[in-house]
Amino acid sequence: MARLFFAIWPPAATAAALCEWAGLVQRSAGGRALDAAAIHLTLAFLGDLEPERAAAAIAAARSVRGVPHVLPVEETKHWPRNDIVWVGPREMPPPLEALASSLAAALAGEGFALERRRFAAHVTLLRKVRVAPRLPPLPQLEWPVEEFSLVRSTLAAGGSRYEIVERFPLRQDAPRI
Ligand code: ATP
Ligand code: MG
């Protein structure tokens, strides 16, 4: 069994910039910042799967057609109900919404029961932030979305560790002439 989810990983420089911003928040408000390598946007959470169900999830993901786009990261929020600080787009980019919903539909077609909650583009940067933090402005960030990934999560001492199992590139459709 493996604990699996689909996610979008930022380019390393973007993750580093987000991690640096999270460090500023942590200095003033405490909490635990994610390592740069762990920063991601979850598209769909699967949970613990047997290998044959993981194969079905991979088959579903291969059938998904999404288009490359850019994720604007401009919103910052602290949620006192679960003590996290997250960042994300102010408005859902339509290609991201389309990607999440076509992945959800493909997974449903393979019999996966996903959460009924509407997809939200949240990138968690800190946990256990128990006081209302002052959230500094975000730096200019580039987050091109050109693929999504199936990721395995394993429990480790300092929090979950993530490993990419398979990548699914997004391809701009060839222009019709
Ligand atoms: P930890 O659970 O160790 O604090 P984590 O939540 O980052 O760390 P996982 O629980 O393996 O690690 O979750 C992987 C990703 O899936 C995270 O982005 C998490 O927010 C998301 N996730 C976890 N459980 C669910 C769920 N029930 N529904 C939707 N998303 C989930
Ligand atoms: Mg969790």
Image (spheres, rainbow, N blue to C red):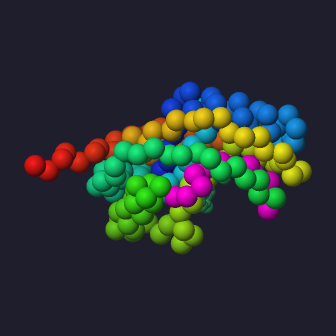
Q: Residue furthest left?
A: 177
Horizontal side of 8 relative to 140 (left or right) equals left
Residue plotted at (70% across, 49% down): 76
Horizontal side of 19 relative to 130 (left or right) equals left
Q: Is residue 90 magenta?
A: yes
Q: How many marks?
A: 0
Residue 123 appears in the picture as rendered: no
- Image location (x, y in percent) of residue 68: 37, 45
Image vertical order of residue 64 relative to residue 135, above or below = below
Residue plotted at (23% across, 48% down): 173
Q: Nearer the viewer, residue 25 or 58?
A: 25
Residue 28 appears in the picture as rendered: yes
Horizontal side of 64 relative to 122 (left or right) equals left
- Image location (x, y in percent) of residue 116: 54, 72
- Image location (x, y in percent) of residue 157: 73, 36
Q: Residue furthest bottom?
A: 116
Image vertical order of residue 11 relative to residue 42, above or below = above
Q: Nearer the viewer, residue 1 or 11?
A: 11
Residue plotted at (57% across, 36% down): 141
Residue plotted at (61% across, 50% down): 88
Boundaries of the magenta span = 81-92
- Image location (x, y in percent) of residue 26: 82, 37
Q: Is residue 135 magenta?
A: no
